Image (tube, grey):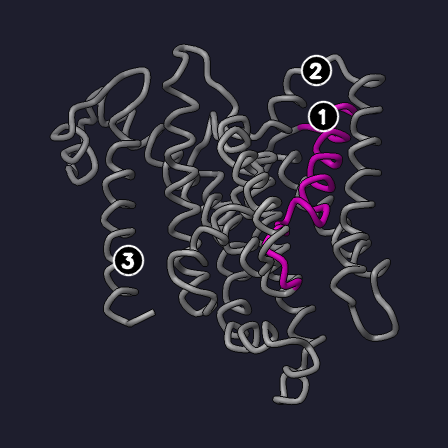
Amino acid sequence: MGNKKTYLIFLFSLILLFLIFLLALMIGSTPIPIRTTIDSLFSFDSELTRFSVIIRQIRLPRVILSFLVGSALAIAGAVFQGIIRNPMVDPYIVGISAGAGTAATIAIIFNMTWSLFYFNTIPLFAFIGAIITVVLVYNISKVGNKIPVMNFLLAGVAIGFILDAIRSFLMVTGTNDMQQVVFWLMGSLAGTSWRDIRIVLPYYFIGLIPILLYIKDLNIILLGEDNAQTLGVEVEKVKKTLITSATLITAAVVSVSGSIGFIGLVMPHMARMLIGPDHRKLIPFAAILGGIFLMVSDMLARSLMPPLEIPVGIITAIAGGPYFIYLLRKNKSGGW
């Protein structure tokens, strides 16, 4: 693909991102005109109007978080698909979501949910659960000093099933607060505040830096691990680093948004179709697409059935499920 076409695609996606950003701030239970929305964003008047409070304190952090969550899941999906060289892989298939969800359920059921200033135990439990799950999957799939990709994938699926079963058992037998658990597991950005962004951002950038540093090596691994080894890439070291980094950013966003599926699966694949397999372009483009997709999904979640808010994970699943089936059917005749 020529550089000119790539630049045009990036330019168009950034313009679309800006327009969706404005639209997401305007739409809600209280519609706000575009002029008022822009004034609320850039006015430094100390006397905030009702609209300014809605924009700055409620919608702006929610829209920013939806972009961060969507882009992080898309980045992690692109990394896992690159490592495993399979377009039908995302962070949820390797058990990260199940680990986070089970840990959050334990916190809710055993009444370990308390807050102190900006600190809340549910995101902490979700984060720890995701990290423990990946460490477990990693060690189960390890053969000597290597991590065969199929072993990693199958171990993730198996651990995910076990954790889902444990979580279902706990939900049936141990909680009176079922609604909170179910809402968290379906994924939601309701109640987002600036505190959630402060929780996510450090882990987002800490995880992103190694991914960017090893992005060329990830391209070489696409040629095959043996070829990459021959070309001087320390394959196992790169895989460990990338898996850890992708897990970190996934766990960070899942800890505040709950389980939101299919973004990590669908967005990298769409980006690959539009811009090609080069991860230097693919990962930033998938991040933009993932952010746009979750911003639109969240708009639909809070505006389709007012005053009821639909968990955003339902919207992404409705959109992503058919696309996954399309991938399965395409894979029968094509493959990667």
Residue 186's tag is none
Above or below: residue 98 compared with residue 168 = below
Q: Is residue 71 above or below residue 256?
A: below
Q: Amino acid at mark 3?
A: Ile
Three-letter amino acid code at disc 2? Asp
Residue at x 28% of width, y 38% of height: 20
Whether residues under marks 1 and 2 lie with C-beta atoms below 8 angstroms apart, the answer is: yes
**Labelled pair 1, 3 in contact (Cβ < 8 Å):** no
Apparent side of residue 130 relative to residue 331 in the rendered image (left or right): right
- Mark 2 or mark 3, which has the lower sequence index? 3
Q: For mark 1, does the 10 Å Cα neighbourhood hold few (<14), some (14 to 19), or many (20 or more) residues? A: many
Q: Which residues are magenta?
A: 84-113
* Image marks 2 and 3: residues in contact by CB distance under 8 Å: no
Q: CA distance from mark 1 to mark 3?
A: 44 Å
Of the two numbered discs 1 and 2 on the same chain, state the one appearing first in sequence: 1
Q: Which mark is residue 9?
A: 3
- Toward the viewer: 213 or 270? 270
Q: Is residue 110 magenta?
A: yes
Residue at the disc numbered 1: 108
Residue 3 highlighted magenta (yes or no): no
Q: Name which quarter of the figure residue 239 lies in.
A: bottom right
Name the residue rendered at 24%, 27% in the picture: 26
Q: Nearer the viewer, residue 93 or 50?
A: 93
Q: Quadrant of the N terminus?
A: bottom left
N-terminal of the two: label 1 or label 3?
Answer: 3
Q: Which residue is mark 2?
A: 177
Determine whether 292 is above or below 310 in the image: below
- Mark 1 and mark 2: span between their CA atoms? 8 Å
In x, y percent, where is residue 158?
82, 45
* Viewer-nearest of discs 1 and 3: 3
Q: Position of residue 226 (x, y in %)?
A: 70, 81
| Residue 230 visible in this rendered orientation of the protein | yes
